Amino acid sequence: MNVFHRALEIAKIEGTGTLLRKAWRHALLKLDQETGILSLLLAPYTSKEFKSITSWTSALDFVFSDNIVALLIRPMQIREEIAQLLRIVDELKPRVVLEIGTARGGTLFLWTRAAAEDALLVSIDLPGGLFGGGYARPKAVLYKHFALGKQRIELLRADSHNPNTLEKVKQLVGSKGVDFLFIDGDHRYEGVKRDYEMYSPLVRSGGVIAFHDIVPGPEENVGGVPRFWSELKKSLPQGRYLEIVRDWSQGGYGIGVVFK
């Protein structure tokens, strides 16, 4: 279904008012994704609001609300799925979190509310902007405001497959090891496999690794992640992995969890 027909369907079922609100919201998100200008302008006013959100449950409510800042950072996740993963992360209370693929920043925000109060959170994503694949540079200002207490956020705008990026991560993490690794970057089969092979050795024994988009769906959305996940779980013993899926017929999404 193309955009025009989708718009007609919304207008018919939900009314023109809803259509206009959704169109305006989409335009704002698109503008911020490409330029980061809204995130930059709102960043000075968000610090107090972010600091008032101290639990992962309230953070989850926030990112799925209609708050303008929440719309800018909303994670591309199914709420029930990410909530179940957050319960696992909250129980782990990681002191070192590594996220590959940050995009709007929603999951990074959620990890801060489930991590330890002195956690180091490292994000890797490609440089974004009008011709980039990650997030626009101005959005980094907003992301830095996510930190609570003594938490520290390090944003690496780089290719996760570059050996230099891996070395930077090793320098940041040091001898502590990674407690929680979230892989949601390059969705090509070779890409997700390389991210796993490069960064999973950094995860300590007892740590957790999670992948997004393990459910088969449109190639442009899930890429080769379902194939890689299917191969990976076959190599793991029972009890060492978990699949968080609302509905296997949903066409994409889904979270795969590995307990190291």
Image (tube, grey):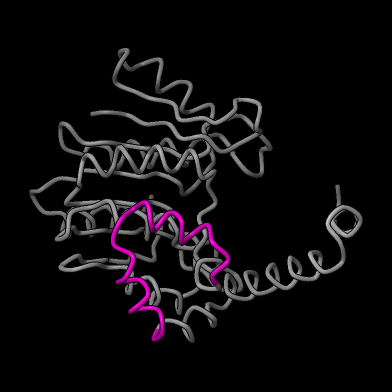
In this image, 38 relative to 195: left or right?
right
Q: Is residue 251 visible?
A: yes
Relative side of 217 to 200, left or right: right
* Spot occupied by residue 158 in the image (x, y as percentages of width and height): 39, 62
Residue 225 screen position, x and y as percent: 52, 34
Q: Residue at x 27, y 37 (%)?
A: 200
Task: Name the one closer to the observer, 120 or 196.
Answer: 120
Residue farthest to the left? 175
**At 30% across and 37% down in the image, what residue appears?**
88
Count all numbered tags in the image, as a single digit.
0
Between 183 and 167, the one nearer to me in the picture: 183
Question: Which image quadrant for residue 121?
Answer: bottom left
Q: Is residue 53 above or below residue 229?
A: below
At x 62%, y 69%, the residue is 29
Is residue 3 visible in the rendered structure shown here? no
165 to the left or right of 79: left
- Residue 37 is situated, as x and y percent measured from the top left of the image, at 54, 83
Whether residue 46 appears in magenta in the rendering, the answer is yes
Location of residue 153 (image quadrant): bottom left
Residue range highlighted in magenta: 44-67
Residue 52 x %, y %: 32, 70
Tell which of 170 and 144 is nearer to you. Answer: 144
| Location of the C terminus (image quadrant) | top left
Residue found at x 40% / y 75%: 142
Asked where in the image residue 120 lies, by quadrant, the reply is bottom left
Q: Is residue 138 above or below residue 257?
A: below
